[in-house]
Structure formats: C-alpha cells, structure tokens
C-alpha cells in the first residue's frame, strides 16, 4: 500500500505564489549574512562592539533567510495550511527595514563618520569592494522584499 499525500502534506513551498521572489530573497539574505560573517574578525580586531555588530548582522540575515524559506506563518499547529499573508507581509516589511537600516548605516559611516561609539566614532570608514558588494546585495534584497510586501497586501486594520 502506498501513501499519497493530500494537499495538506505536499511540499510547503508549492503553495506560495511568490515562490520565485521568495527564493531570490532567501539567496540574497543568506549571501549578505555570509558576507557580514566574513568581516566579523576584521571588525572584532578593531573593537569588540564592531565585531559584535557584524556578528549580529550576519546571524540576523542568515536566520531571516532560513525563516523566509520555511515560512512558519503558513502552517497551523497540526502542520495544516493556513492563510498567513498578514504575517508574511509584516515579515517582509521587517526584513526590508532592517536591511535598509544597514545600507543607510554603511553610507553614514563612509560619508559622515561612525556614529556615537567605539574607537572610530566620528571617523569615516573607507569604501571597500566587499562592503559595496554587500550593500548592492542588500539593496536588491530591499527591492525584492518591497515587491513581496506589496503583493501580500496590507494586514487587516491598516488603512490609507
């Protein structure tokens, strides 16, 4: 006797109409996280706070990508499918805001200076190929998350 899975048990991702964009967002987020991870040691050598910031940025982007591919908001406690667009919308907006913050912080630290803390406070950092590549990835990620957020609509209760 063979088991034929019903619609509730098929691959979770095949239900997502935004799957191609979600895959792009996952790849971009994990890539940016890995690039931040490659810079942890360099920034840790400069000051523990800078290293910790890069470690959190790397972990946050990596975990964000993993959660994005699993999409736990689409499943109830029994593993059944549920409409989780409200949570997806908020998750996309959260990722957009966090990555936009990292891009803006990069621009500030390269033009105005490192804000507030650490031994390099007030000093400008140099533009590097790794930094620019990471920011390019994050900018594309922000764009993809913006499109995903628009496609999932507004959560209930939010009006124009």
Image (tube, grey):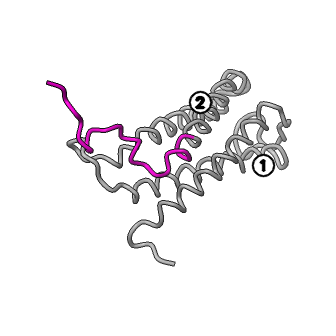
- Name the residue: 47% across, 35% down: 66
The image quarter containing residue 117 is top right
Q: Is residue 64 left or right of residue 99?
A: left
Q: Is residue 28 left or right of residue 87?
A: right
Q: Quadrant of the N terminus?
A: top left
Q: Which mark is residue 65?
A: none
Start-end of magenta stretch: 1-23
Asked whether 9 falls inside the magenta stretch, the response is: yes
Q: Residues within 10 Å of mark 2 (few under 14, many from 20)?
A: many
Residue tagged 1: 108
**Furthest-bottom residue in view?**
160
- Name the residue: 24% across, 36% down: 5
Q: Position of residue 80 (x, y in %)?
A: 24, 45
- Name the residue: 22% across, 33% down: 4
Q: Is residue 87 left or right of residue 160?
A: left
- Name the residue: 77% across, 30% down: 130
Q: Say which of 7 and 88 sits in front.
A: 7
Q: Say which of 45 and 27 sits in front.
A: 27
Q: Say which of 11 and 144 sits in front.
A: 11
Q: Position of residue 32 (x, y in %)?
A: 64, 35
Nearer the N terminus, badge 2 or badge 1?
A: 2
Asked whether 52 falls inside the magenta stretch, the response is: no
Dot 2 falls on a residue whose secondary structure is helix
**Furthest-front residue in view?**
1
Q: Say which of 117 and 22 sits in front.
A: 22
The image quarter containing residue 118 is top right
The main secondary structure of the magenta stretch is: loop
Q: Position of residue 31 (x, y in %)?
A: 63, 32
Dot 1 falls on a residue whose secondary structure is helix
Marks 2 and 1, how far apart in space? 20 Å
Q: Is residue 105 left or right of residue 73?
A: right
Residue tagged 2: 55
């Amino acid at each position: 006797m063979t088991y034929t899975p019903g619609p509730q048990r098929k691959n979770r991702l095949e239900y997502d109409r935004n799957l191609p964009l979600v895959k792009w967002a996952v790849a971009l987020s994990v890539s940016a996280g890995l690039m931040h991870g490659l810079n942890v040691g360099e920034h840790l050598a400069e000051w523990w706070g800078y290293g910790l910031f890069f470690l959190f940025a790397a972990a946050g982007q990596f975990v964000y990508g993993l959660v994005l591919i699993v999409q736990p908001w689409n499943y109830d406690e029994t593993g059944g499918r549920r409409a989780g667009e409200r949570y997806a919308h908020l998750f996309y907006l959260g990722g957009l805001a966090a990555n936009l913050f990292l891009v803006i912080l990069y621009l500030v630290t390269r033009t105005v200076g490192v804000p507030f803390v650490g031994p390099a406070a007030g000093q400008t950092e140099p533009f590097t190929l790794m930094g620019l590549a990471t920011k390019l990835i994050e900018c594309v990620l922000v764009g993809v998350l913006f499109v995903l957020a628009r496609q999932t609509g507004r959560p209930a209760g939010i009006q124009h």
